[in-house]
Amino acid sequence: MSRPISVRLLVLACLLAPALSGCRYNFLPVVPTPVEVTLPTRVTAATLERDGDTLVLRARVDGRFSPGYLSVAWFDGARELGRDSVYLDAAQREATFRLDAPDPGAFRAVIAFGGNVLRQVELYEVQP
């Protein structure tokens, strides 16, 4: 009577052996489909520096975007100094903005594209 139980156990173990082996693929398909990533519009390079009595802001926009205006808002501390914008498209991705500022200050330039703020760059010549 114990013999049929051990035979049944042996048959069951042989049937389950492939399912219990450690070398098998856990996911199907084995090679996943490639994921396509679309990066949002972003400013990859932005510099704010003084050139004599003028502040110069250079910005480069990368990523996929529909043509539109890259805008900048200039600030000295909390006081707004002005605004400017440049039209960008796939061929023109860089912009240079200039602002007359003869006196030193705590300058900030807020860069926006399509109504979304992308970056803020700062130049502190005095304490804010």
Image (spheres, rainbow, N blue to C red):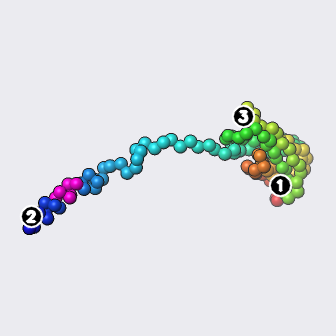
**Could you give the CA–CA distance between mark 1 and mark 3, rounded to whole angstroms?**
33 Å
Membership of 60 in magenta stretch: no
Q: Is residue 12 magenta?
A: yes
Q: Residue 78: x, y in percent?
A: 85, 58
Disc 2 residue type?
Answer: Arg
Quarter assignment of residue 5 = bottom left
Quadrant in the rendering for residue 15: bottom left
* Depicted 123 relative to depicted 36: above or below: below
Residue on which the image places disc 2: 3
Q: Which labelled disc corresponds to residue 90? A: 3
Report the front residue among 103 and 8: 8
Q: Which amino acid type corresponds to the residue marked 3 in the rendered image?
A: Ala
Residue count near mark 1 (Cα–Cα under 10 Å), binned few <14, some 14–19, many ≥20: some
Majority secondary structure in the magenta region: helix
Kindly identify the amino acid type of the residue bearing the numbered disc 1. Ala
Question: Which part of the image, by quadrant, shows the N terminus?
Answer: bottom left
- x%, y% of residue 3? 9, 64
- Tell me the residue at 16%/58% (across/down): 10
- The magenta stretch is 10-15
- Mark 3 nearby-residue class (10 Å; few <14, some 14–19, many ≥20): few
Q: Is residue 127 visible?
A: yes
Whole-percent x, y for residue 79 in the image: 88, 56
Q: Nearer the viewer, mark 1 or mark 3?
A: 3
Q: Are marks 1 and 2 in contact (CB under 8 Å)?
A: no
Residue ID for mark 1: 106
